[in-house]
Amino acid sequence: MGPVTLRGGGELFLTEVLKTTNYRKRGFLAYLRTLSLRDTILLEQPDPQNSERCYSELVNLTDDKCLALIIRDAPDDGKKALGILRTHFAGNSKPRIIALYTELTSLMKDEYKTVTDYILRAERAVSALRNAGETISDGLMIAMVFTGLPRSFRPFTVNI
């Protein structure tokens, strides 16, 4: 399942929205508003037909992992599905924290990705850990970023 291209450029991945800041979550709600589905997520008793449409949009925006989380427990229920995903990504359970640390410590810069993209991935992982209540120093983040750089960056890392 791919991204949704937003008006004015940019892409929206639900996984990234749920992992990161409230600013992006508001962007997702604004996207739902353009589809007249925002109230479906916010109301206590949403219209069942709109809830199904909202669920369909969520399914189109999620990856396979997210789909596996919601397909069984919230079929055709957009509000419940988004609640499940929010709980999963905002959680501070031990398995979630271990997965975030694993993501941070196994970062590797791909040959075809830019350094900026690589650093943003590291910052997202650190941000998610901090949101889960973990204390991550800037020094640890820098060490993890340097560790995942290819050999061609070694002279740069030695000088810093």
Image (tube, rainbow, N blue to C red):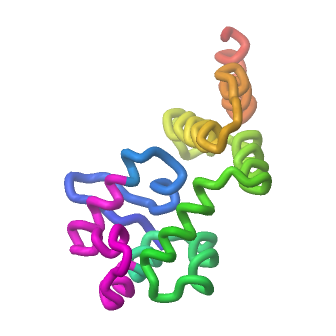
Q: What residue sits 52% from the left and 88% below the top?
A: 75
Residue interval drawn in magenta: 26-54
Instruction: List x then y, in percent, for residue 145.
Output: 67, 30
The answer to whether one can see residue 118 in this image is: no
Q: Quadrant of residue 58?
A: bottom left
Instruction: List x then y, in percent, for residue 133.
Output: 67, 39
Q: Is residue 42 magenta?
A: yes
Describe residue 139's horizontal placement relative to residue 37 as left or right. Answer: right
Instruction: List x then y, in percent, for residue 69.
Output: 62, 75
Q: Residue furthest front?
A: 44
Quarter of the image that includes the C terminus = top right
Describe residue 103's horizontal placement relative to residue 74 as left or right. Answer: right
Taking depth in this image into account, of 26 and 59 the one nearest to the observer is 26
Q: Quadrant of residue 154?
A: top right
Q: Does residue 113 sit above or below 88 in this rendering?
A: above
Q: What residue sits 51% from the left and 40% below the top?
A: 117
Instruction: List x then y, in percent, for residue 74.
Output: 54, 83
Taking depth in this image into account, of 71 and 50 the one nearest to the observer is 50
Q: What residue sits 36% from the left and 57% below the top?
A: 11
Q: Quadrant of residue 5?
A: bottom left
Q: Is residue 46 magenta?
A: yes
Q: What residue sits 27% from the left and 59% below the top?
A: 30
Q: Does residue 40 sit above or below 104 in this rendering?
A: below
What type of secondary structure mainly makes up the magenta span?
Answer: helix
Q: Does residue 81 sit above or below 85 in this rendering?
A: below
Describe residue 23's horizontal placement relative to residue 102 as left or right. Answer: left
Q: How many marks?
A: 0
Q: Residue furthest top?
A: 159
The answer to whether one can see residue 72 in this image is: yes
Taking depth in this image into account, of 52 and 9 the one nearest to the observer is 52
